[in-house]
Image: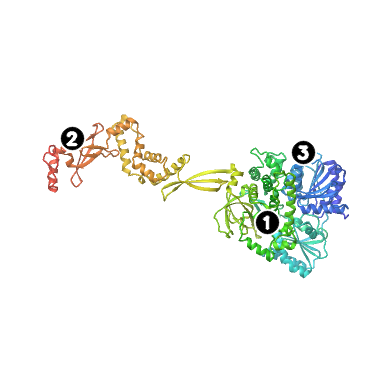
Amino acid sequence: MQPLPVDALLPQVLETLRRVSHNLVIQAPPGAGKTTRVPAALLDESLALEGEVWVLEPRRMAARMAARRVAEERGERLGELVGYQVRFEDVSGARTRLRFLTEGVLTRRLLSDPQLGSVSAVVLDEFHERHLQADLALALLRRLQRTTRPELRIVAMSATLEAAPVAEYLGGCPSLRSEGRRFEVEIEHLAREDERPLAAQVERAVRRLLSENLEGDVLVFLPGAAEIRRAHEACAPLADEFELLILPLHGELPAAEQDRAVRPAERRKIILSTNVAETSVTIEGVTVVVDSGLARVAGHSLWSGLPTLDVARISRASAAQRAGRAGRTRPGRCLRLYTAQDFNARPEYDAPEILRADLAEPALELHAAGVKDLARFDWFDAPPPSALDAADKLLRKLGALDREGALTSTGQRMLRFPLHPRLARLLVEAERRGVGRAACLVAALVGERDIRAGSRLSLDARERRAANARATSPSDLLELSDLFDEAERLRFAPDALRRLGLDAGAVRAVERVRRQLQRIIERGATKDTRGAKLSSSLSSSQETELLISILAGYPDRVARRRVSTERGESAGAELLLAGGGAASLAAESVVRDARFLVAVEAGERRETGRGKGGRGRGETLVRLASAIAPEWLLDLFTESIEETTETNWNATSERVEVVRRMVYEGLVLEEWRANEASGADMPEVSSVLAEAALAAGLEAFTERERYERFLARVEFMARAFPEAGFPSLSEEDVRACLVRLCEGRRSFSELREAVGAGELLELLRGRLSGEQSRLLSKMAPERLTLARGRQVRVNYEREKPPWVASRLQDFFGMREGLRVAGGRVAVVLHLLAPNGRPVQLTTDLAGFWERHYPQVRRELSRRYPRHAWPENPLQESPR
């Protein structure tokens, strides 16, 4: 067995764990051998004689490769003494005592075996990556160690880890460091920023390195699988020219293709890899690294509840990890596709995933482990309170938690599935509705990468895509299921998959996950819950049940089309999302006719620019959608449905309109205008009408003098009869009565009719007492009768005496003038000539007849000879 640098540290590791502390932090640079040698030493030492050693790896590929390397070094067959377990794959047996696991598997094992009775030591490898599940595993292990398993050993290992915080969290445990075997790595940065596409930059860098006759394989770090495909196409001519192999390496590849990339080959290799190659076991033969400085980082938007996928700059620690790959076995070289200034401006470490990720899955697991208050849980790094609140809110929405935060029976059933709570809820609902097996394919299609191939499509596949661009369906997931079913009928033959435009690796992954989920379903199935085998065999009613089950997993992703589109015009369709916000439906979606849908796969994808500041633009795009009917929401989420009533003023029709809506999480499901307001609506209707009436002004409903005359009469009575206590009415009282008049009405026309009928004046009169109202009618009459029976209107004005106006002849035969207020107040008489102009204003009619009438008679008789002008107006009456 080849000696490795960490071998010299192993005696001290074992001695520390045996005599000093049950916890330990180990720092060792890349290539030191910590991943394979430390767990094997724990297994061989008496520390593990009575239990297993579990090793947590950040990725499936790392777990598989490390287990295989240890088994080879020990001359064992993989799956015997040494094994591994990742999601949906368990290569171990009854003899297995050294088990490499992915981090999420440990959490699930803690739920099924809270004491980890068979485990004596747990090693957290590459802890510096700070994956969410690694943080959760550390916290749960420490909680177990502090309570019922004090003898449990915990070892945290990393190449770039800041040891002090972890050691302090583990009770102030010791920290050991291995210097490792260091070969010189020459690092080169760009002199200035390169604005060309990334694939072109990679091709130029690799060509330059090859032209310098460098020996060994080239490892290129790229953000994701899409960038790997583009770089592969750009570098294909180089492979022909220099007789090289170009091999992709990322976590979604089948194990055989991953092995091909990392194992020695007869020809030199260009390995195009994501950051999975940063921390796995040594890749033999690599002497040159080309580092793009980028990685695709998953995140979570708290405002929308949607996942994000950003291309971001890696930290200086990750850059050092990547460069170290070139110096594992001999001196190497690293070419960074960014400037030294860019490198120096980067953070030292990557931000822990727990600070930016969706916490729904760990929150469910913690609740299942008996943690009721997640904020008080002893985290290594506490997540943002807003993220914890969002996770609990989603779990309650999914029905996994009750109002008090306790796990429900639905939540218990969800834990059977090693999936995100959304997909687990989908399966639980599908089981209940008898379509559980069909839902397994849907969950696998959502949970794994897209089975549709990328850039290179056969002619048949292109024609199929073109036909799909014109097709319509209630769900993109049903379309994908049909596509998968067709591939299965063709036995997943490579030629058939190419014709269908499917990615063979993705199809295999979906098939593997589907079978695993179906086994879980079958173990818990009853006669009543066994559903159809595949979606293609579903009846119409079963298809509806499956679509309802999809909704159950995405209650917060309900959307409504902003504008209905015609068939075949789905590109750019705008959607309104429940809870607020908007999104666009992808052009390739076949959900073209549905008014309501759920956004099954939607994300805010931001591409970070390579320039200073990394500016990028984000957009919420729904890639996979599934139609729903509003009544399904009523069935599943009754408590989230509310009926609202909105009253609006229509200035054109001068009428209050009542709009009723059925709303789900702020999203309008149904809207209609009510012709008549109900009793419950009338106060709001009256209020809106009153607001509009006051804004229009009193003149819109009645002549101002009508109510001003009444106010003046009341003011006159207050002066004439102070002892009666008449109130001081103003225009504000009139406005208040107008508001009162709006009660039970909804339009200006109704108001005008009521005002015209005297209802406004009646309301004003209602502000007087009964006695005051009687006095007003008697003592401040609106009309008075003259000698010949003619009635005249009495005019009342504020702070002025009352007055009447009529022709002079109407007063013939009257010795005295008029009086009101029971004789207390004389009325001012406006004596008018035949032309309507006053010839005299007086309260002393007798004095007028005696002193002024003779002169007035001479003047008026000349101007109006046809009128009678008797010498004695008290005896004569006009003709």
Residue carrying label 2: 816
Residue plotted at (44% across, 49% down): 650
Q: Nearer the viewer, mark 3 or mark 2?
A: 2
Residue under numbered circle 1: 482
Towards the viewer: 127 or 467: 467
Front-most of residues 265 and 204 = 265
Q: Secondary structure at mark 3?
A: helix
Q: Callout 3: 10 Å neighbours few (<14), some, many (20+)?
A: few
The residues bearing labels 3 and 2 have C-alpha atoms spaced at a distance of: 113 Å
Q: Residue 47 at x, y = what percent?
A: 85, 43
Per the model, the C-alpha gap separating discs 1 and 3 is 51 Å
User: Residue type at mark 1?
Assistant: Asp
In terms of sequence position, does the residue under pointer 1 or pointer 3 come before the other?
3
Label 2 neighbour load within 10 Å: few <14, some 14-19, many 20+:
some
| Label located before the other in sequence (2 or 1) | 1
Give, as a three-letter code, the residue at label 3: Arg
Secondary structure, mark 2, is: loop
Mark 1: which secondary structure?
A: helix
In the image, residue 88 sits, relative to residue 761, either above or below, namely below
What is the x, y in percent for residue 97? 84, 46
* Residue 149 position by quadrant: top right
Q: Earlier in the sequence, mark 3 or mark 2?
A: 3
| Quadrant in the picture for the C terminus | top left
Q: Nearer the viewer, mark 2 or mark 1?
A: 1
Q: Residue furthest top?
A: 723
